[in-house]
Image (cartoon, rainbow, N blue to C red):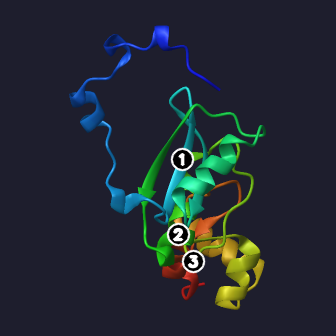
Amino acid sequence: MQQDKSKLSSENMESIDKILKIKKPASELGKSGIYFLIKDDIIVYVGQTRNSESRIYSHFNDASKDFDSYSFIPYNEDELNDMEAYYVATLNTKYNMTMPQNNIFKSVPQLKTIFGKGALDIRKAIKKARAKIYFDSYYIVSDVAKYIDSI
């Protein structure tokens, strides 16, 4: 496709200041981290990636997620599951439907397995801890752990 050269002029160019203001370090290319898809300044989806550009681009071609911009925070690969879960649990986004595998947030059935206790004991510890519920049915493991032995 050939550009209409009559529309090209120095007036269409961005200033050097603007170009430098929006620059990103080359070290971020292909980085692992957490990305946020954004629509009208509202975070609508949180995901993790080991290759930032290709993963975000794949969403761009996916009509099921409507977004107009994105943000990216680099994290080490061993932090991705827990950090993604933290953002999913606390941001209440439009498109995240499941809690990712992680070590921080667990459901009552998962807490039963971790602590070797019944559901009633787990619920008592949750109540005693005044543990906040996240993403409809998940609790922070360390909150429950503080009280599980006293049940």
Q: Which of the image's four quarters has the C terminus?
A: bottom right
Please tell me whether mark 2 sits on a helix, a strand or a loop: helix
Disc 2 to disc 1: CB gap under 8 Å = no
Disc 3 to disc 1: CB gap under 8 Å = no
Task: Give amino acid for label 2.
Answer: Leu
Please tell me whether mark 3 sits on a helix, a strand or a loop: loop
Disc 3 to disc 2: CB gap under 8 Å = no
- Label 2 vs label 1: CA separation? 13 Å
**Depicted 91 relative to depicted 83: above or below:** above
**Depicted 36 relative to depicted 40: above or below:** below
- Label 3 vs label 2: CA separation? 11 Å
- Other residues around mark 3 within 10 Å, as few (<14) / some (14–19) / many (≥20): few
Residue reaching furthest top?
A: 6
- Other residues around mark 1 within 10 Å, as few (<14) / some (14–19) / many (≥20): many
75 sits to left or right of 48 = left
Residue 141: percent from left, percent from top = 56, 75
Residue 100, can we see it? yes
Task: Give amino acid for label 1.
Answer: Phe
Residue 33: percent from left, percent from top = 48, 62
Q: Measuring 60% from the left and 56% from the top, which residue is drawn there?
A: 54
72 sits to left or right of 126 = left
Report which residue position mark 1 lands on.
36
Q: Which mark is residue 80?
A: 2
Residue 6: percent from left, percent from top = 48, 8
Compare marks 3 and 1 and give the one earlier in the sequence: 1
52 sits to left or right of 93 = left
Compare marks 2 and 1 and give the one earlier in the sequence: 1
Report which residue position mark 3 lands on.
103
Residue 131, can we see it? no
